[in-house]
Image: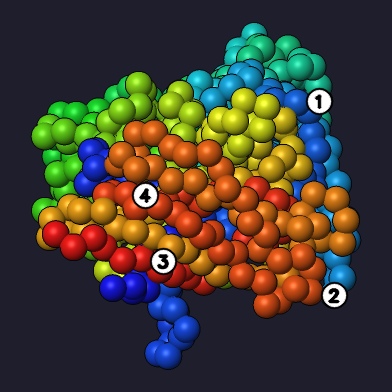
Amino acid sequence: MRQAIDPGIVGVAYQAPMTLQDAENAINWYIEVAEVDGAKEAIALLGCPGKNPIISTQTGPVRGCWVLPGGTQALAAVANVLYLISLNAAATQTSIATFSVSAVGTLLTSSGPVVMRDNGTLTENAGGVCFIVDGQFWYYYNLSGTANVFTFTGIPTSGSTTLALPLTATLGYGLIISPTALLTDANAYIPQGTYIASINYSTPSITMSQAAIGSFPGGETVTLTVPVFGQITDPGALPADRLAFIQGWVIANQTGTRNAFCSGPSPYFNLFPPLYFAQKQSSSDNLITLMENNTELWLVGERTSEVWYNSQTSAQQNPFVPIPGVAPQIGCSAKHSIARLGPMLAWLAKNEQGENMIVASQGYSWIRLSNHAIEHAIASYPYVADAIGFAYEEEGHLFYQITFPTADATLVYDATASGRLGKPCWHQRASFNPATGQYHRDVANCFMDLQDLRLVGDYQSGQIHQLSRNIYTDAGNPLRCQRRAKHIWKKPDRTRVRQSSLQVEFTPGVGLQSGQGQTPQAMLRWSDDGGFTWSSEHWRSIGAAGVTLNRAIWRRLGGPRDRVFEVNFSDPTARDVIGATLFCEAEDG
């Protein structure tokens, strides 16, 4: 008897370890769940956003980016150059915002993630700096975009590198330890090219890079001129690859240890006193990553985590202390996989029991975001410690995107759809090489929201792309989508299912006026052996411009015992799918 069934073209992706159980996947398509009763279909497939290059820098990886206070400027690290992105013209009803870009500094490394945090605009000589780490070195950028000048009273002594401060003095805001931040004095007793080498916080006094050539026992005016950009050589700024900012303090991890340390000796200082460090205490495993969340600091180690808060109890040491009794038994496999996902933190996890699971914080504990299909995929990757993650929101969907550079793969968790359906909703994001017919990792290496634009940095070209569902190419390359559906089979006795026609309902009439996409085509193929081998492609139009009654229908589909349909689409047009219907009948017995 002929019947109409849902073939699963629209559905949640779940490619099981054994594809004979479930072969479903989704590449560059994600689930939209209706939030009202009575919708034509409860779920649909929406095309993932395309990318439009709008900011060009040098060729190389965009390693990190950060929006500066005020929301009109941002920093981006591309290869070994730090760029300042500035708003040229705000968006209008007919155009997006435009930007200019200028190089402001040179980094000492050319690859690997770069992390940035600022401590706010310069107010009463406090703050005013964006801190930058690349895993080995520290740098600063003045948020003013100009050299900052600070004055204080110092007591130089001829032949000595110690610049004493008056006994009643405290360290002034604005000091920074950098070979490019230079000291001068009114009487020229401090030689040209002298900078701060270190600071004695007990005295307090300053150790200069050169000895004074004259004495002024009564003290004189000393000026510190801090250029726009420079390397930080503060002895307390140890090698770090993660930063956080909480209530005026900048916090970092010391790479390869259990230690975290922070700026000081008070909030909004740009110095790193050597006593302002503390160890992760609940377990002996090293600290892998850290991130701020709700004014609390999560320290995530190899096997365990801790949550710290700002106690403000001492002026002589790191003010952050662990919350008593809070030590989730979960660690991290990839330091740069951590990202804030709404009210939670998400990351690639591991502990003493295993790894390759993606989790999120929940209160002071954690929950699993991945499923067996995702965990099976991650377990197949040759190396995962280089994974990078970011989260972003688009059209009400909150996404966590994690890329595995060595494995050349990108996976995306849709927190919004997962919450609506009560099950993990994942899909893949991928760039497509038409010359080889191969998918590769998504080109997005980092994310920022600037001037109402979702922007991602390209890991190869040095370009920064606008991310939007109104863009239908992948930075000029085909934005190819693929959806593999569920198995179609007769469960009671596994006999043949004769299939007369399949109709897939795309958004119709979306063809372009000329060129590729004038008559956009959907491509259907199928596997009759559980996803091991596939048929050739069969093309159907989803509707030229204005042809809104078009239906994409494939007929005479045969009578397999077990079939998986696969739909592909690559034309530069809208490609949303509302649903599908398969007309079929099963053999008797």
200 up-or-down from 290: above or below: above
Does the CB distance between marks 3 and 2 fall below 8 Å? Answer: no
Q: Which of marks 1 and 2 is in front?
A: 2
Q: Which amino acid does label 2 sit on?
A: Gln
Mark 2 is surrounded, within 10 Å at the Cα level, by few (under 14), some (14 to 19) or many (20 or more) other residues, namely few
Residue 424 located left or right of residue 179: left
Quickly name the residue at label 1. Answer: 187
Towards the viewer: 536 or 432: 536
Measured as percent of width and height from the top left, residue 547 is found at 75, 73
Residue 98 is at least partly visible in this image:
yes
Image coloring type: rainbow
Please give the label number shown on residue 93: 2
Which mark sits nearer the N-terminus, 1 or 2? 2
Residue beneath disc 3: 582
How many C-alpha atoms fall within 10 Å of the one at disc 4: few (<14), some, or many (≥20)?
many
The residue at the far front in this view is: 588
Q: What residue did someone put label 4 on?
A: 564
Q: What element carries label 3?
A: strand
Task: Report the mark closest to the observer, 3 or 2.
Answer: 3
> How many badges with numbers are in the image?
4
> Of the residues shown, which amino acid type is indicated by label 4?
Val
